[in-house]
Image (cartoon, helix red, strand yellow):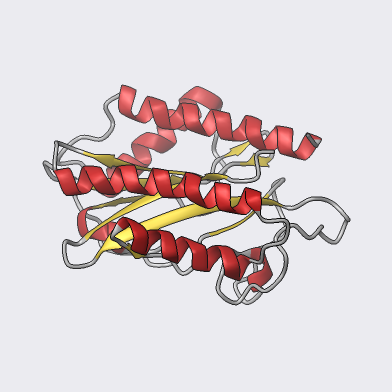
Amino acid sequence: MTLVKQQLIAAEKKAAKLFQEIEARGLLLVGKTEKEINTAIFNLAFELFGIEKYWHKRIVRAGRNTLKPYDENPENLSLQPEDILFIDFGPIFEEWEADFGRTYVLGNDPLKTKLAHDIERAWWDGKAYFDTQKNITGAQLYEYCHTLANNYGWEFGGDIAGHLIGHFPHERLEKEDKTNYIHPENTTDMRALDQKGEERNWILEIHFVDRKKEIGGFFEQLMTLS
């Protein structure tokens, strides 16, 4: 395992610890706005790890806002009883990036609970598919993620299904350069080496939605673990 991958895995483990503490500290309170929860998590991350830098905007989305992909900036909703929400943070640990996303369900709504379970299972399906392919383009993996959504009875909600991750500040992820993304226009082999001849590391993100029920779920973490 390369030193880069070791550092990325170490950063992700810290991000996972942060997300565990979000629930343990009871930060997901009914009546709190998305922005209030966002600020509370920011303060918790500083308390636990001294983190002040994030390589992308911090996202907390509840209710119908869970339909919205990353690029949108919806209204600031308050968390409701029996709600669903997801959190997507990109903390930087000692100059190494993490990108971690999880979905939470308040109460026992069976459809929302199914969605939360399905996106995690689908993430592991996507990783297993990637791991079994000697050569695979971003477009092929993106198409597979869409197939997973259909198989699980949902619609895929994201314009991308992941992206490169690395040392901060990593090579800027130019929106027009689709080779940096798991995207339908990325026809480059994801296993191809970067400009320095080094292995590239990928984040896989699964965003399933039900537009009629106005709910969505999101699960994201480092895919290239081995």
**Is any atom of residue 55 visible in this view?**
no
Residue sitting at x 60%, y 77% = 185
**Is any atom of residue 49 visible in this view?**
yes
Residue 220 point in image, percent of width and height: 48, 47
Is 116 rendered above or below residue 139?
above
Is 133 rendered above or below residue 13?
below
Direction from residue 106 to residue 93 in the image, left or right: right
Which quadrant of the view contains residue 11?
top right
Decide which of 171, 38 is in the foreground and name it: 171
Residue 97 point in image, percent of width and height: 63, 43
Residue sitting at x 51%, y 61% = 161
Direction from residue 159 to residue 22 in the image, left or right: left
Residue sitting at x 31%, y 23% = 25
Is 101 rendered above or below residue 7?
below
Q: Residue furthest right?
A: 197
Decide which of 134, 113 is in the foreground and name it: 134
Direction from residue 80 to residue 89 in the image, left or right: right
Q: Quadrant of the C terminus?
A: top right
Q: Quadrant of the N terminus?
A: top right
